[in-house]
Amino acid sequence: MRILFHATGGKPDPWLADLTQAVPGAEVRAWQEGDHAAADYAVVWQPPRAMLQNRTGLKAIFNLGAGVDGIMALGDALPAGVPVVRLDDAGMGVQMAEYVSHAVLHYFRRFDDYALQQKEGRWRFLKPHEKQDFTVGILGLGILGTRIAGALAAMGFPLHGWSRSPKDVAGVTCHAGADGLDAFLAASRVLVCILPLTAETRGILNRDTLGKLPKGAYVVNVARGGHLVEEDLLALVQAGHIAGATLDVFREEPLPPAHPFWQEPRITITPHAAAVTLRGDSVRQIAGKIVQLERGEPIAGVVDPSKGY
Ligand code: NAP
Ligand code: GLV
């Protein structure tokens, strides 16, 4: 069995070695420009168009992440009918829960205000926020959104969640679809975005939606930069409607040095580091799914092309 590998921005060698060891009988090779030789499976992150366009014979394309926007963006260049398979958690759930819990606690316990006071050398006790008023709204109740909800529920935060289809998640007031969005936003003192980036969700964090959050709300975006209209967030932070934002993802990555976010003290920036792909967990998951496919069994994590995630 032949496996073709390419991860934009990553080093292939450790992956080639681990996949070779994990998949019985596999010949694993790094894709190079001009490689049109046969392959049964592709394992990719942000693959170049030339890797997959006009390729025949693939049984599945495995994505080295949860978000498949980098693959789906290839559109008609993707081989027709070949399943695209995302990573299911694979160690990212706990990382996301840690990152978002940290951000929520940072705002809830007023570390943002204390950091600004420290810059001015001020010693002043600030009235704590009331937990019952500090509702966290989670946009996206999938694999990672429900892990985030579980971690925040354990600390007693009131939770709301929003998804495409109606859900029943313990400890979460669930809203669904376009009709449920306004009530969800009105309830969210902290808005966490963990949606996939699709035609429907691009630009969902904009002047209109962010303006529907309660005054003094916080925004945490750990999904994709394309969800956020950056100018709208900056204007709302500067106007005082949004009290702060923690952003892990940006329209352009790396965030350009001249970007105004760098200079805004109410915006915290991390370099797309909220939940990284762990090689050991990912290789085990992909190898297991290849074995299932070879046996003719169904697998989890197959992307629905009509939804884009
Ligand atoms: P998932 O399991 O596919 O969950 C996606 C959730 O979003 C589902 O609840 C889905 O609703 C909801 N959704 C999708 N489109 C919607 C729409 N139009 N309206 C309302 N709800 C919608 O995905 P996941 O594994 O949780 O990952 C989510 C995203 O996190 C990834 O796509 C990726 O972009 C991002 N991510 C970021 C990092 C990082 O380091 N920053 C790391 C990993 C992942 P249904 O349940 O009804 O389908
Ligand atoms: C990372 O951003 C992922 O989608 O896994």
Image (cartoon, helix red, strand yellow):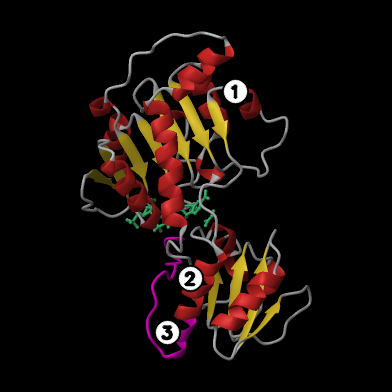
Q: Is mark 1 within 8 Å of ligand 1?
A: no
Choose between 291 and 62: the one closer to the eye.
Answer: 291
Q: Which residues are magenta?
A: 290-309
Secondary structure at badge 1 equals: loop
Q: Quadrant of the N terminus?
A: bottom right
**Position in image of residue 286 (x %, y %):** 50, 75
Q: Nearer the viewer, mark 2 or mark 3?
A: 3
Q: Residue 69, which numbered label?
A: none
Q: Residue 85, which numbered label?
A: 2
Residue occupying the point 30% across, 28% down: 134
Question: Is residue 292 a member of the stretch shown in magenta?
Answer: yes
Q: Is residue 157 left or right of residue 76?
A: left
Residue occupying the point 40% across, 47% down: 97
Q: Is residue 163 above or below residue 183?
A: below
Question: Is residue 90 a member of the stretch shown in magenta?
Answer: no
The amino acid on which the numbered mark 1 sits, given as a three-letter code, is Glu
Residue occupying the point 31% across, 39% down: 181
Disc 1: which residue: 264
The amino acid on which the numbered mark 2 sits, given as a three-letter code, is Val
Secondary structure at badge 2 equals: strand
**Position in image of residue 280 (x %, y %):** 54, 68
Q: Is residue 209 visible?
A: no
Q: Quadrant of the C terminus?
A: bottom left
Q: In the rendered image, which quarter is residue 88 located in?
A: bottom left
Q: Is residue 76 visible?
A: yes
Disc 3: which residue: 292
Q: CA distance from mark 3 to mark 1?
A: 49 Å
**Position in image of residue 172 (x %, y %):** 24, 44
Q: CA distance from mark 2 to mark 3?
A: 13 Å
The amino acid on which the numbered mark 3 sits, given as a three-letter code, is Gln
Looking at this view, name the residue that lies furthest to the right.
34
Upstream in sequence: badge 3 or badge 1: 1
